[in-house]
Image (cartoon, grey):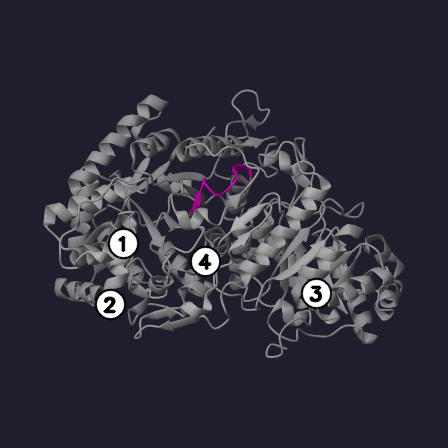
Amino acid sequence: MHLAVSLAQGEAPSGVQADAGLDFSLLARFVQKAEAAGLDMVLLADSAPVAGGDAWSRQVPFEATTLLAALATVTSRIGLVAAASTVAHQPYNLARRFASLDIISHGRAGWNATMVPDPREAANFSRPEGFSRDDFRRRAEEFIGIVQGLWRGWDADALLFDKSGGRFFDPEKMHLLDHKGEFFSVRGPLNVARSPQDTPVLVMSGLSEHDMEIAARFADVILLDEPLDAKADDLKRRALGFGRSPGEIKVLMNVAPGAETAAGPDVIADRLEEPFRSKSCDGFNILMPPVLSVLDDFVGLVLPELRRRGLLRSDYPGATLRSHLGLAGEEEQ
Amino acid sequence: MTAHRRQMKLGAFLWATGHHIAAWRHPQAHVKAGVDIDHYIRLARTAEAAKFDMLFCEDAAGVREADVNIASQTSRSIGFEPISLLAALAVQTSHIGLVSTASTSHNEPYGLARTFLSLDHLSGGRAGWNLVTSASHIEAANFGATGLRPHADRYERAREFAEIVTGLWHGKLDGASGSGHDGQCFSVRDPLDLPRSPQGAPVMVQAGASDVGRDLAARTADVVFTAAQTFEEAKAFYGDLKGRLAAYGRGPDDIKIMPGVAPVVAETESEAREKYEELQELIPDDVGVALLSSYLSISDLSRYPIDGPLPELPASEGMQSRQALVIEQSRRDNLSIRQLARHFAGARGHWRIVGTPAQIADELEARFEGGAADGFNVMPSYFPGELDAFAALVVPELQRRGLFRTEYEGRTSREHLGLKRPA
């Protein structure tokens, strides 16, 4: 079973103060604790622009990719996935940012591309007229394809570092993207080296029925809100159509165990075991506020129960996020 | 040491394996700099221990050389994206400023303002943005798009971009109205969703040296980087820019002018010369000529005899100030293409000094005291060795003379630089 924890803001259970706030060191302790517990990855939300004066005060006040970079230097195993919007960035810049984050984290970075447009976002990015739902989807599909294409612009063995021969890289192993599409034209190549885990992990979330095709084609990890067997099967079948094996996509179900912690670890473990055993999902994305006590309860009570039932590995199998997720090539697994 | 002596500001300009084009081939250069975060953490800590004002990162949103064969003989086609690099360094350091270049040509102001403010919070008020415009076709080819607003002149776009970013940072998006921005190049509706900067606003840095670039700097910059070969050039630039400030209601101390300097330092002059020559020997001719061609914004300098003079050149839309500087030097010193290529390949048009710690301190002091600089952006030839050497040899010499701090003045970049906190 794969487990991620997602920093959900403003959702602290009643009576619990969301304490991360402005303080990076508290966030760092939170993620270090998740790492000590052996979780696959932490998902960092990117706070959306919210109208009104004090909206920021209940959010983590860091843009997600910069936060990821900082967290990468104070952790060593756990995967770090940042949300970043296809409206707020250009594909070249975003591909570059994540490729760089992946090297900084030694192969532990991922991009969460949400397919839900934020209605306020376009207005802050010189598109006051916004995007139609269909334009947004086609644009996002093109965007994601460009980003993944740029990530593959350098072969894994392209860098020679040959001082005496005077060849830094092998020109044959650098590839232009030369993409010309409906919304973007991007030549490439990326000016960041190939990822230590081949490419950063692509997480997709907020999928509508129409987005399934895109997800089956591009995603490494898909976050779903409901445990629908049919949906997971459908995704994996579609993946086959794109020449991918069903195991190349991990489906995680979003769960918010907050209120149920009181119900006891057995109840929560039961709730996670059932859909996992029935193969509705490959694991779970636990939504919780960045509050140490909430994480403590989950890690201290629920994880031992899952391990006792043989549902959860006890340590990281490798160094990269892909290896935690069982997505790495053979040499890394 | 005089208690109240004016002191110089120093930046540590990080760039891949080093500022010398052949740095990566030097036996002591760390050849894997572009994929090794620990190397950068070490550099940052070295610079911080030496009390540098800031780390400075250059940037381009594309590879730097169109010809893949030339590119493959340099280390500059890969490296870290600077904002993610500085965010990582922010939590591994405690005092040093963190400045990154980002182009107004290939970003949107809301996103960039937000990212730099996030870096500022992560670092406790140590972030800075070096505003540049992009003239590179290589970069432009990565940002082809349809459905965007009309692309105004790149300096008009930069001016509007800077106005929005500073407006967002200062919590006043559009002058008195506070109701968003709807301009020629950009529209922005909301304030930023992050709290105000710990230093009031991230530091604004600029490097443009053209007339329109100087006006933009006089209006918006806290720090200006510049390239100047001679004392006279540096002094003229310094006087001109400081003279433009009054028109924008600013005083001469509101901007710190920090020209680039590429030092090669060793205990003795002959050792320093030897070190410099060793680097020059490592430059392949085709790489040097290609680099020179790019500074001159012409594509085919290689068809002229390498030991002959620079040909007459047509006017160009590219980097005009750099072009003028190269041409002027070639005529003044009667240099062949090969000599000129090697000369500029080494320091990229910046001021090069080779010598002992005392000689280098003398030169820096002369420009600092002579009204040509408020400080310097130090461009080590290769990393980590030349940054280590500058920190170990030159900084103590400057400190002995009372020309450089021995302890940070505070915690934020504005405090080190002696800049006012914006209201």
How much space separates mark 2 and mark 1, taking CA atoms?
A: 22 Å
Same chain? Circles 2 and 3: no
Q: Residues within 10 Å of mark 2 (few under 14, many from 20)?
A: some
Q: In the rendered structure, does residue B106 fall within the stretch colored magenta?
A: yes
Q: Amino acid at mark 4?
A: Asn
Q: Which structural element holds mark 1?
A: loop
For residue B279, what is the image quadrant? bottom left
> Which mark is nearer the camera, 2 or 3?
3
Q: Which residue is mark 2?
A: B282
- Whether labels 3 and 1 share one chain: no
The 10 Å Cα crowd at callout 4, few under 14, some 14 to 19, many 20 or more, is: many
Q: Quadrant of the N terminus of chain B?
A: top left
Q: Which residue is mark 3?
A: A242
Mark 2 or 1, nearer chain start = 2
Q: Chain of mark 2?
A: B
Q: How far separated are the C-alphas under marks 2 and 3?
A: 48 Å
Q: Is residue A162 left or right of residue B307?
A: right
Measure the alpha-carbon separation of dots 3 and 1.
45 Å
Picture coordinates of residue B211 (x, y %)? 29, 32
Marks 4/1: CA–CA distance: 24 Å
Residue A54: % across, % down? 66, 34
Please tell me whether mark 4 or mark 1 is closer to you in this view: 1
Write the start and end of the magenta stretch as one range: B101-110
Q: Identify the residue under disc 1.
A: B300
The type of residue carrying mark 2 is Leu
The residue that appears at 32% across and 60% down in the rendered structure is: B18
Residue under pointer 4: A191
Q: Nearer the viewer, mark 4 or mark 3?
A: 3
Q: Are the residues tagged 3 and 1 within 8 Å (C-beta)?
A: no
